[in-house]
Image (cartoon, rainbow, N blue to C red):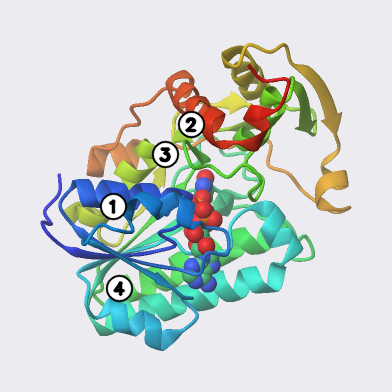
Amino acid sequence: MSLLENCNVLVTGGAGFIGSHLTDYLLGKGHGVTIIDDLSTGSLDNIGHLLDDPRVKFIEGTILDPELVEYFVKKCDLIFHLAAVVGVKNVVDFPRHGIEVNVGGTEIVLRSAAEHKCRIVLASSSEVYGISTDIPFREDGDRVLGPTNVQRWSYAASKALDEHLGLTYAADGLPVSAVRYFNAYGPRIQESGYGSVIARFMTQAFSGGNITLYGDGSQTRSFTYVADTVRGTYLAGTHPDAVGEIFNIGSRVETSVRELATAICKLTNVKPVFETIPFEEIFGSNFQDIGRRVPCIDKAEKLLGFVPEISLEEGLKKTIAWARKNYKSANSTHSK
Ligand SMILES: NC(=O)c1ccc[n+]([C@@H]2O[C@H](COP(=O)([O-])OP(=O)(O)OC[C@H]3O[C@@H](n4cnc5c(N)ncnc54)[C@H](O)[C@@H]3O)[C@@H](O)[C@H]2O)c1
């Protein structure tokens, strides 16, 4: 249920994967959208179809610029704050930059939202649960993170700090909500991006089916089609019961990475040949992976009416169809 109509919405990170789909969705709901994005991992390709739309304003700039943020926040009714340094690989490679953007940038956006009393949704992550084994993850469950000399945890810590900060503003009356995303995927997922496992497996399937599994491939995730991710995000920004709350936004279906690769190979008509690579070879010597990651989404279902609608098979079919047209690897000699 949406109570907002014809709003001016600010989407930070709107040229990114989820942000661009969210922008499409917001336009479909009759809103105007301003995007602030520095194009560090986002791309104009994601929003090329929107650039001539008079309801869309694209600003190439950083959320680390308080004046820029303030200028656009004061003109908007609702903010979806998605801009972040994203992905384990990026965070491990550039940990300080990750903390600066993910904590410092969020602080700037939140402060401005408070100044102008603007409703805001923060994009958080399933990473905040860390290596908790209390499955399925509930929003009020304990978080278990590894030591601070393992840089992957800086991302989880930064997103958790964003939530803490957001809740302090909520306590002061600002309508803040946060969504913890679980492995969103779909069209526009970058081929050579920050390491989406689905993008990597599609690329490898298009190139003949030699699949590299990090670890033994038994680790599980909750792969969530981006249309579901976006609908959950919109509900968190518009539903009256969402204010001051944090929601898991993901699929209830737990899938191992090996099962995922097998499904992608089946849908691309290739026979998978698996090779396993230890995590340390990819992410460095003291890397810690997460064995199982599954959300409890009862809270989002009860308060927001959120239920994922797209099955993994259906979502993968749509994603593969898009990737066939857009990935360089899809035009290699192996793919038909
Ligand atoms: N994709 C997922 O499964 C997933 C899971 C958990 C959380 N998230 C969160 O969702 C949000 C969107 O992620 P995504 O998957 O679309 O990734 P993405 O990299 O496609 O989107 C992030 C966007 O933020 C922009 N950005 C980065 N730093 C910026 C800055 N300083 N100023 C302005 N723009 C900046 C990037 O250019 C990019 O367009 C992020 O906050 C991410 O942490 C995503």
Residue corresponding to mark 4: 171
In the image, 271 versus 167, the foreground residue is 271
Q: CA distance from mark 2 to mark 1?
A: 28 Å
Q: Nearer the viewer, mark 2 or mark 1?
A: 2
Residue corresponding to mark 2: 322
Give whichever of discs 3 and 1 has the lower sequence position. 3
Q: Nearer the viewer, mark 4 or mark 3?
A: 3
Residue corresponding to mark 1: 236
Residue corresponding to mark 3: 226
Mark 4 lies within 8 Å of ligand 1 (Cβ measured): no
Asked if the residues shown at circle 3 and circle 1 are in contact, with their CB atoms under 8 angstroms apart, the answer is no
- For the point 50% across and 35% down, the residue is 136
Q: CA distance from mark 4 to mark 3?
A: 31 Å
**Three-letter code for the amino acid on which mark 3 is drawn:** Val
Left or right of 324 in this view: 328: right
**Three-letter code for the amino acid on which mark 1 is drawn:** Ala
Percent coordinates x, y for residue 202 in the rendering: 63, 29
Percent coordinates x, y for residue 9 in the rendering: 25, 64
Q: Is residue 237 above or below residue 185?
A: below
Q: Is residue 181 above or below residue 70?
A: above
